[in-house]
Image (cartoon, helix red, strand yellow):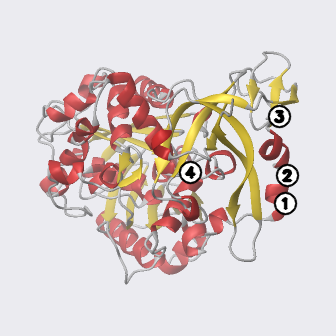
Amino acid sequence: MVYIVGVGLTPVGNHWSKSLRHLAVEASVKALEDYGKDVDYVVVSNMLSGVINGQENLGSYVVSHLGKIGTPAIKVEAAGASGAAASVVAQGLISSGMAERVLVVGVEKMTDYTSLEDTTSALSTAIDSEYEGFPGGTLDAMHALVMREYMKKYGVNREDFSYFPLLMHKNAVDTPHAQLRFKLKPESYMRSPMIAEPITLLDLAPVSDGAAAIVLSKEPDGPNGNAEILSVGHATDTIAIYRRESLTEMPAIRAAFSEALERANIERGSIDLYNIHDYSSVLGYITTEELGLAERGKAPELFKNGGADRDGPTPVNPEGGLKARGNPVGATGVYQIAEAFLQVTGRAEGAQVEGAKTALTLSAGGLASNVIIHLIRGV
Amino acid sequence: MWAYWQSVPAHWREIPARYRLEGGECQDCGYRMIPREDICPKCGSRNVKPINLPRKGNVVNYTVIWNAPRGYEYYTPYVIAIIELEDGTRLTAQLTDVEPSDVKEGMEVEMVLRKTRVSGESGLIAYSYKFRPLIK
């Protein structure tokens, strides 16, 4: 058994005055202070430091700046699922006896690229760069293909996609570490600039800097709250979407979810909240459908009718999700697990789901080509 | 920018696929793919032979890109489409010689060789397949 025993977050946003190292150290120190003891391993998660910051070898890099020279440390990458993957590796280190307490720190510093073209290039390394990226495709374009297919198959229009970002922004207002803490007007969504038709700027997660850290331990020995990682479900799909059978189904999500439920031996009804990977509105919708929260093609109604609200029957992203909490890509998975940890220990401040005991986090790399689900329960 | 900076060998070794749609055909299950894989993604067979894929097909799905990655700004707005070739093989390609507003699902297209990416003033000028509306 592995427990989450400490947490530390930096606000998500544009940290012009902070480098990759400042962010990683800030979150790590907070998590270690929250836990109150030292760790014997460090697992860093990140996606873009090699591309954007010209820095790899993040294991050594982080421990060097954290004053922990000598401590074993590595970096784990799985695009948008990097943070969840780092948690998986850390759990393996503990289960195998290689470590007793592991610091998992996710960090991403995206704003050092100051033009959208370069940021788009960097993010698009998550798709097949030789046969989707090279012809001029982008990660956003792949989401656009999925959105067009979804609209055609279920006969929904652009307005139906507004319900997702509207709820995410509303939730983020109450989240201290969120990037976009303001409400969105429906008319702003409809006027949003086109990125890749039919995807607009307000369908997509923003560009973000941030770092999140958690401490995992083999004992529930955190002084400020503990949560058990009940299970992990993990599955992959083809990286190039032109080879997929369907664009409106995400079989890797289904596989990871049923595996996670089986391993945890719990019913889906006992999950109190869902922290999902909504890089785009349409991915948010399809994910909720694959998790069984809505029938196929009916996710827009779930979000329109309050079913996914923080005080609704199946809360989705009570902190605001990638859309409004922000998406420092390689750190996002750690933010998700950290938020779930705060929820199930009753420490989620303004974003708290009343009485939450069990939470699901779902992180996705690429276009849901690498899906990792955690089931987490407060103890 | 490093992400899209193309070296000569990185482009050169993809030439069979990018210049003439050379893909692969699984000799065990018949599945066709581009690029050719050493292992069939459908059945796991290692018996995959090179094959020249048909150069005509139709548009299955498409998006108009307004926010281009570095190195593609010149073409904006441009269309990225999933094309289904006449034998059923699918690939992602850029459309050319067409206004984005004229693109339709099901539109018949054919392959042409076009300049695709210029890696800066002194870098490689890479050519590859694009698809244009079929000239009948």
**Disc marking residue B38:** 3
Q: Of circles 1 and 3, which is in front?
A: 1
Q: Which disc is residue A118 wearing?
A: none
Q: Disc 1 vs disc 2: Cβ atoms closer than 8 Å?
A: yes
Front residue of A69 and A131 = A131
- Spatial separation of the CA atoms under disc 4 and disc 1: 22 Å
Is residue A207 shown above or below A196? below
Quadrant containing the N terminus of chain A is top left
Amino acid on which the number 4 mark rests in the picture: Ala
Q: Could you say where residue B37 lies in the image, as x and y percent from the top left?
A: 79, 35
Dot in front, 2 or 4: 2
Mark 3–mark 4 CB contact (< 8 Å): no
Amino acid on which disc 3 is placed = Asp
Could you classify mark 2 by the number of other residues whose Cα lies within 10 Å: few (under 14), some (14-19), or many (20 or more)? few
Residue annotated with mark 4: A126
For the residue carrying disc 3, how many other residues have a C-alpha within 10 Å: few (<14), some (14-19), or many (20+)?
some
- Tell me which numbered mark, 3 or 2, is placed earlier along the sequence: 2
Asked whether A251 or A339 is in front, the reply is A251
Crowd around label 4: few <14 · some 14–19 · many ≥20 (10 Å):
many
Query: Share a chain, discs 1 and 2?
Result: yes
Q: Which-is-in-front pick, marks 3 and 2?
A: 2
Q: Is residue B45 above or below residue B6?
A: above
Q: Chain of mark 3?
A: B
Chain letter belonging to callout 1: B
Nearer mark to the viewer, of 4 and 1: 1
Mark seen at residue B9: 1
- Height in image: A340 above or below A125? above
Position above or below: A147 against B1: above
